Amino acid sequence: DGGITQSPKYLFRKEGQNVTLSCEQNLNHDAMYWYRQDPGQGLRLIYYSQIVNDFQKGDIAEGYSVSREKKESFPLTVTSAQKNPTAFYLCASNDRGTGNTIYFGEGSWLTVV
Amino acid sequence: AQSVTQLDSQVPVFEEAPVELRCNYSSSVSVYLFWYVQYPNQGLQLLLKYLSGSTLVKGINGFEAEFNKSQTSFHLRKPSVHISDTAEYFCAVSVNRDDKIIFGKGTRLHILP
């Protein structure tokens, strides 16, 4: 089945540790995104990538890093520099052929303990 | 830069009653407009989208939205809600030829028995 797969669904991290969230898509979409969701704040854009080996900062990129070595994969690393990392993280990809419609993965819950 | 405002953070409505969720946007250029739905602990699912053409757009689950350029609005409506419509709804906007997609803060729809 075509879609976007995020893993893990739930992740616990100790303070001071880096953690990487995986995002894989088999939709052949060029553009991919990472959003962070906090209660009452909607979705905020962390990073996005329009093409392999290229990515841009979103509105809240500080404390995060990404890579885009393959079209199918866009992993997000939450570094120890992110002061408040506990949140729900959503990966998405974009079907530019039908007017920039975004398709989402099921999300990953990150909790810092 | 474009932005999206969802005027209500929560909307309670009785089952089988009609509902309208409001969305206003700002942009100096032509836009694409979207409504997404999010059920608890899941990713977002596309309800409907406006790209061009008819200003009345029909989506899944009996929802529809009307694009009003003069009022810069894209309100979501359903004539009769069901308990299964309980979810959070997000309005989003993207600019032609721009991959950046901006989301509103969401409206939580509560269906009362």
Image: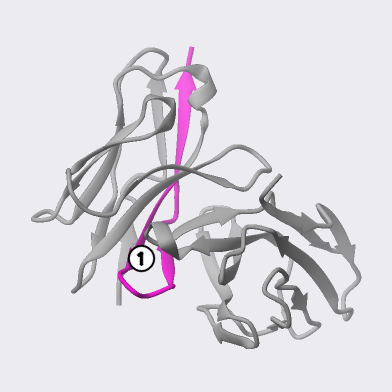
Q: In the figure, residue A56 lies in which quadrant?
A: bottom right
Q: In the figure, residue B47 lies in which quadrant?
A: top left
Q: Secondary structure at mark 1?
A: strand
* Residue that appears at 60% across and 82% down: A61
Quarter of the image that includes the N terminus of chain B: bottom left
Residue B100 higher or lower than B68, as above or below: below
Bounds of the magenta segment: B90-113
Q: Residue B103, can we see it?
A: no
Question: Which SS type dominates the magenta stretch?
Answer: strand
Specify how the rendered protein is coloured: one colour
Residue A7: percent from the left, percent from the top? 81, 58
The chain carrying label 1 is B
Point out the residue furthest to the left here.
B70
Residue A36: percent from the left, percent from the top? 61, 64
How packed is label 1: few (under 14 Cα within 10 Å), some, or many (20 or more)? many
B43 in magenta: no
* Residue that appears at 40% across and 56% down: A98
Q: In the figure, residue B99 lies in which quadrant?
A: bottom left
Residue B50 higher or lower than A18, as above or below: above
> Viewed as shown, does residue A71 lie left or right of B33?
right
* Residue that appears at 59% across and 37% down: B39
> Viewed as shown, does residue A29 lie left or right of A68?
left
> Viewed as shown, does residue A8 lie left or right of B3?
right
Residue B38: percent from the left, percent from the top? 55, 42
Q: Which residue is mark 1?
A: B94
Give the total number of marks visible in the rendering.
Answer: 1
Q: Amino acid at mark 1?
A: Ser
> Viewed as shown, does residue B12 lie left or right of A84?
left
Residue A28 higher or lower than B6, as above or below: below
B99 in magenta: yes
* Residue that appears at 20% across and 72% down: B29
